[in-house]
Image: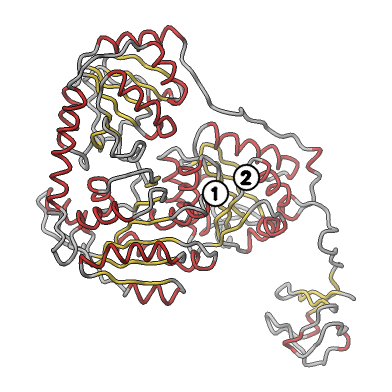
């Protein structure tokens, strides 16, 4: 059976397949087609066709550059890729199709692909990929990749590129991707020479892992299709881990400073998330309260007796007083965000794997290393403090903070008040839920009023970009399919990402999306008030989120009375399908 190519559009007429829709069954020779038969793609006549090379049977062709790229991704543990296929990425997408080790999640907007990939790394420590096309597909990744850059999340972006680059005006979907990604990426290159494929892919993955950031590779579509024997290519390898422990003299110095402190306070950050047991052990030994940054919310259950609150504008006022009044602040994996407001004039003990974060404040002891390894060694060297009143004092401050938050949770107010919503969510969501939080008033109230048990939380930290919450929930369900995925978002943030609700339905990703619907960009409304501007431009005209969910194949439920919220959330969790809970919410803060 021969093959014929249309010289106008490139369509291949395969005699073995025929053109059933055009009246030519499988096995119809090209010469046997009627004279008035036309190309099914561009409607050119038979005279536009010329003989085409034979197609090699599936599985019998030689390995291509694209196959090698995907094989190397899988070899490094990349098992999920988010993106949208297109002309300049067809070779890579087909290689993913043929490789069962990598799952391709096709989204509706590339920004959501990058957000999901960033969240995947924040939740698991594993690298996820973005795979999309040249030009607009690549540029759409930018916001999500900037989120990964700012929060030090490891992500690799594999982007198609046009065959002939930088030819000047008229290039279709052609941009200088090397220049575009330069401010975002820790590694950034284009595969111009197929023999460098393995080296560039492995180097990109190495940089993403070691430098905890974004690696970007562009692959021209003609290079993607070229054959390549990867066994003859050079490749990079990588350290098996980034585990670092300070020298003994520094540990001894830190222990002596801790033993000499009379009012020590512990501030646990994102970098201490996998050292929760040691954080509590340190608090017990030196009789110190535990504060956390917002990103580290949930590092220990909020029922932990030594835990008080987040430090920052969503936390207890008493947390600020303790931090400012400490004679030693022990910061564990803390990024020193402006919103946390770490008092750098207080003597510090800093533990962080990133040397760039060390050296805050005029005096202190800096320990470069992973909290999960440094803290046990520090505990061995600390004598500890004996203060029988410490736990009672922390408990009294905690009770005061709980009473304040309980008083804010008005169970009778309509529309529902955000403090009440967070109280009900705290009481009803499963202890093992993975919670993604969007940016806006929903995030402020979550940080302040949601009481973590043993849930895991993920958010957009330093970039603080609206629209992060929902794609992060998709990543959460892919990463932890056995756990309940919950997105807490506002109407502003959800509407930025809600096109991918159909993605959750398509890939059967059960989750609960709680939309605080106040028809306002409410945080901006508060900021205008604080800066003495009149309120302007914050009102939202929303679709009916319940009907939208149903149109997407999900379940939509509206909550407009306080007593309905708890039962609806419990039912949504049990449904085991994507559910949007549209909660009519008061836009006022207090």
Residue 461 in the image: x percent, y percent? Answer: 35, 43
From this view, report whether residue 410 is shown above or below residue 13: above
Residue 441 in view of the camera:
no
Q: Residue at x 85, y 77 (%)?
A: 16
Q: Residue at x 59, y 52 (%)?
A: 80
Q: Which residue is mark 2?
A: 190
Residue 186 in the image: x percent, y percent? Answer: 51, 36
- Helix, strand or loop at label 2? It is strand
- Helix, strand or loop at label 1? It is helix
From this view, report whether residue 214 is shown above or below residue 174: above
State which quadrant residue 519 falls in.
bottom left
Are there few (<14), some (14-19), or many (20+) residues within 10 Å of tag 1? many
The N terminus lies in which quarter of the figure? bottom right
From this view, report whether residue 140 is shown above or below residue 154: below
State which quadrant residue 235 falls in.
top right
Q: CA distance from mark 1 to mark 2?
A: 8 Å
Q: Which residue is mark 1?
A: 177
Residue 402 in the image: x percent, y percent? Answer: 17, 43
Are there few (<14), some (14-19), or many (20+) residues within 10 Å of tag 2? some
Instruction: Name the residue nearer the viewer: 227 or 272.
Output: 272
């Amino acid at each position: 059976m021969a093959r014929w190519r249309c010289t106008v559009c490139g369509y291949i007429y395969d005699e073995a397949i025929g053109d059933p829709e055009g009246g030519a069954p499988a096995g119809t020779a090209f010469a046997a087609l009627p004279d008035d038969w036309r190309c099914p793609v561009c409607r050119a006549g038979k005279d536009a066709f010329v003989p085409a090379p034979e197609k090699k049977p599936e599985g019998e062709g030689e390995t291509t550059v694209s196959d090698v790229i995907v094989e190397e991704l899988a070899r490094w543990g990349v098992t999920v890729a988010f993106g949208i296929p297109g002309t300049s990425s067809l070779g890579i997408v087909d290689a993913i199709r043929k490789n069962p080790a990598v799952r391709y999640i096709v989204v509706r907007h590339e920004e959501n692909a990058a957000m999901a990939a960033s969240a995947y790394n924040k939740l698991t420590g594993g690298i996820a990929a973005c795979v999309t096309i040249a030009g607009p597909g690549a540029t759409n990744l930018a916001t999500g990749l900037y989120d990964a850059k700012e929060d030090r999340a490891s992500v690799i972006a594999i982007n198609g590129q046009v065959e002939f680059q930088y030819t000047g005006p008229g290039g279709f979907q052609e941009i200088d991707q090397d220049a575009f990604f330069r401010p975002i990426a820790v590694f950034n290159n284009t595969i111009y020479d197929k023999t460098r494929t393995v080296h560039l892919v492995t180097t990109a993955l190495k940089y993403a892992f070691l430098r905890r950031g974004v690696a970007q590779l562009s692959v021209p579509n003609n290079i993607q299709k070229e054959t390549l024997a990867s066994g003859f290519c050079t490749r990079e390898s990588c350290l098996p881990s980034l585990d670092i422990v300070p020298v003994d003299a520094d540990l001894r110095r830190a222990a002596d400073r801790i033993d000499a402190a009379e009012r020590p306070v512990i501030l646990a950050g994102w970098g201490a998330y996998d050292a929760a047991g040691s954080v509590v052990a340190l608090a017990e030994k030196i009789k110190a309260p535990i504060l956390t940054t917002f990103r580290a919310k949930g590092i220990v259950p909020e029922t932990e007796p030594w835990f008080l609150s987040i430090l920052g504008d969503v936390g207890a006022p008493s947390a600020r007083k303790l931090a400012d009044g400490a004679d030693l602040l022990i910061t564990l994996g803390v990024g020193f965000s402006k919103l946390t407001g770490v008092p750098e004039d207080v003597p510090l003990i800093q533990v962080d794997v990133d040397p760039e974060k060390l050296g805050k404040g005029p005096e202190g002891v800096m320990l470069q290393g992973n909290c999960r390894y440094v803290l046990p060694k520090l505990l061995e060297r600390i004598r500890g403090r004996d203060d029988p009143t410490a736990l009672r004092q922390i408990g009294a401050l905690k009770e005061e903070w709980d009473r304040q938050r309980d008083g804010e949770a008005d169970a009778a107010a309509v529309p529902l008040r955000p403090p009440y919503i967070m109280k009900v969510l705290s009481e009803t969501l499963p202890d093992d839920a993975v919670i993604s939080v969007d940016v806006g008033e929903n995030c402020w109230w979550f940080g302040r009023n949601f009481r973590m048990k043993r849930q895991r939380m993920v958010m957009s930290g330093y970039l603080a970009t609206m629209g992060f919450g929902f794609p992060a929930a998709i990543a959460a369900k892919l990463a932890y399919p056995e756990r309940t995925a919950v997105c807490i978002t506002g109407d502003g943030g959800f509407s930025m990402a809600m096109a991918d609700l159909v993605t959750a339905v398509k890939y059967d990703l059960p989750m609960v999306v709680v939309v605080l619907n106040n028809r306002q960009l409410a945080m901006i409304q508060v900021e205008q008030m604080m800066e003495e501007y009149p309120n302007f431009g914050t009102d939202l005209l929303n679709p009916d989120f319940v009907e939208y969910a149903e149109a997407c194949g999900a379940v939509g439920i509206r909550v407009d009375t306080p007593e309905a919220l708890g039962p609806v959330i419990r039912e949504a969790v049990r449904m085991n399908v994507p559910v949007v809970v549209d909660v009519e919410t008061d836009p006022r803060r207090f």
